[in-house]
Image (cartoon, helix red, strand yellow):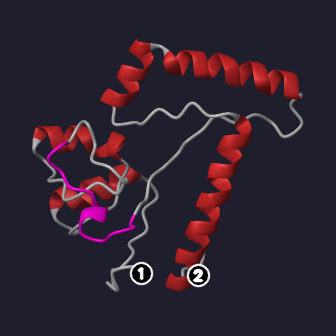
Amino acid sequence: MMADVNLVHVPYRATAMALNDLISGRVEAIFDNLPTSLEYIRAGTLRALAVTTTSRSELLPNIPTVGDFLPGYEASAAPGIGAPRNTPVEIIDKLNREINVALADPKVKARLVDLGGTVLALSPSDYGKLNAAEIEKWAKVVKFSGARPD
């Protein structure tokens, strides 16, 4: 949308299937999360063209960002941990505190980074705001693309 490039979207049920088709040459490129592609990149099976985050990856420091070529571009994933809707606030707060303590542990943090992740130790409120902003951003992209659930 930002680059006025027409790409063909090929839906896959699983990332592994898309990676197999990329490695075998059935598709020319994919946008994937770094943790699932990293070992293929490290092994030389895949060539990373760019990362979609706002800054270069510590794990792939020589790979540019898409934003280096298309200013303002950013696409990243922010997985989180959820609980049932009616979970008491005290339990949510305790879980959040304990999870953030674990995420601050240097060994845990180093392992997540080594896998290609970025650690975001957020409050439930801040994570909710992040999700709301992402939904708003991607709703515009979906509307522009004309994509429909099939």
| Residue at the spot 52% in from the left edge and 35% down from the top edge | 120
Q: Which quarter of the rendered picture does the N terminus lie within? A: bottom left
> Residue 6, position in %: x, y?
33, 85
Q: Left or right: 130 with respect to 76?
A: right
> Which residue lies most toward the left here?
44
Disc 2 residue type (three-letter): Lys
Residue 143 numbered tag: 2
Give whichever of discs 2 and 1 has the lower sequence position: 1
Q: Secondary structure at mark 2?
A: helix
Would residue 73 be seen by someone viewing this image from the given angle? yes
Find the magenta span and give its range.
Answer: 61-73
The residue carrying mark 1 is 1
Asked if the magenta segment contains residue 100, the reply would be no
SS majority, magenta: loop
Asked if the magenta segment contains residue 65, the reply would be yes
| Residue at the spot 31% in from the left edge and 84% down from the top edge | 5
Q: Left or right: 31 with respect to 144?
A: left
Would residue 150 be seen by someone viewing this image from the given angle? no
- Towards the viewer: 40 or 54: 54
Disc 1 residue type (three-letter): Met
Distance from the alpha carbon under mark 2 to that under mark 1: 11 Å
